[in-house]
Amino acid sequence: MSNEEFFAAAERELMAEIDTSVPHSARIWNYWLGGKDNFVVDQEAGDEYTRTFPGIIELARASREFLGRAVRHLAADQDVRQFLDIGTGLPTEDNTHQVAQRAAPSCKIVYVDNDPLVLVHARALLTSRPEGATHYIDADLHDPAGIVRQAADYLDFEQPIALMLMGILGHVNDDEEARSIVRHLVGALPSGSYLVLYDGTATDQAFIDAQQGYDDTGAVPYRLRHPERVADFFAGLELLDPGVVPLPHWRPDPSPLGMPPSVDAYCGVAKK
């Protein structure tokens, strides 16, 4: 069997595991960002969500822009050469490895997810400049020890690593469990590492109502937290300016229009 035949067979097997009768957050996010890796059920759920909370589209775009600014800053200005991106989601434009390796071609990136559709698209993520490396591991956020164990096959845990938790902790409903996951992951990192994190926040009733409607479909729910709960995830770390702020307000690119409008998601970057 050729490599192409092997991968095609593996993809067919993985696709058989995907439930297309229930919407999925990664596919809906892909739909909101203009991607094609989604199904009718995701499009319908995404449209219903935006009818209640139109601001989700701008939030989705702002999240990608924050990722780009944060990764570029760490790779270009802080000399970080390793990134552990947990909750990868489906590939879009300017994924972590693309941004990081544009700034520093030797960067190594490990993506983590446990979604079959993301695994199907892992080959699209597994591209790298020759000087660096990109890997994908199949692991669950609820098992931080397992993530660290697998990531250590590809990353040097004696050198700084940027841990990225981008819009993923909302899938952990219990506050203490979410904090415990972050503590475990950050605790495994060496001094000089960074935590990059954002999550949607309970700062608009329309957002809360839209999320509840989505949760009621039977999809994996997402917990909207208040901004101060998001800030709690950075406890014990040195926050970079401007601290924990709405996504567009973290070191925005210069614009003659001034500070961009806010969205209902807060973010931060902090150093260990």
Image (tube, grey):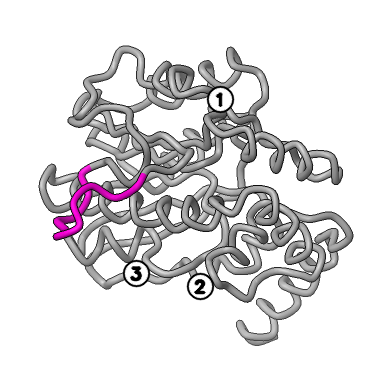
Location of residue 52 in the rendering, given as x and y in whole percent from the top left corner? 69, 49
**Closest to the observer: 66 or 190?**
66
The magenta segment: 251-261
Q: CA distance from mark 2 to mark 1?
A: 32 Å
Q: Magenta stretch containing residue 161, yes or no?
A: no
The crowding category of the residue bearing disc 3, from other C-alpha atoms within 10 Å (few below 14, some 14 to 19, many at least 20), is some
Secondary structure type for disc 2:
helix
Secondary structure type for disc 3:
loop
- The residue that mark 3 highlights is 128
How many numbered markers are drawn? 3
The crowding category of the residue bearing disc 1, from other C-alpha atoms within 10 Å (few below 14, some 14 to 19, many at least 20), is many
Q: Judge from the rendering whether residue 36 lies leftward or rightward of residue 137; answer left or right.
A: right
- The residue that mark 1 highlights is 225
Q: Earlier in the sequence, mark 3 or mark 1?
A: 3
Question: At 50% from the left edge and 54% from the top edge, which residue is drawn?
Answer: 60
The crowding category of the residue bearing disc 2, from other C-alpha atoms within 10 Å (few below 14, some 14 to 19, many at least 20), is few
Quadrant of the rendered image containing residue 157 = top left
Q: Amino acid at mark 3?
A: Ser
Question: At 23% from the left edge and 47% from the top edge, which residue is drawn?
Answer: 259
Q: Magenta stretch containing residue 259, yes or no?
A: yes
Q: Nearer the viewer, mark 2 or mark 1?
A: 1
Q: Are marks 3 and 1 in contact (CB under 8 Å)?
A: no
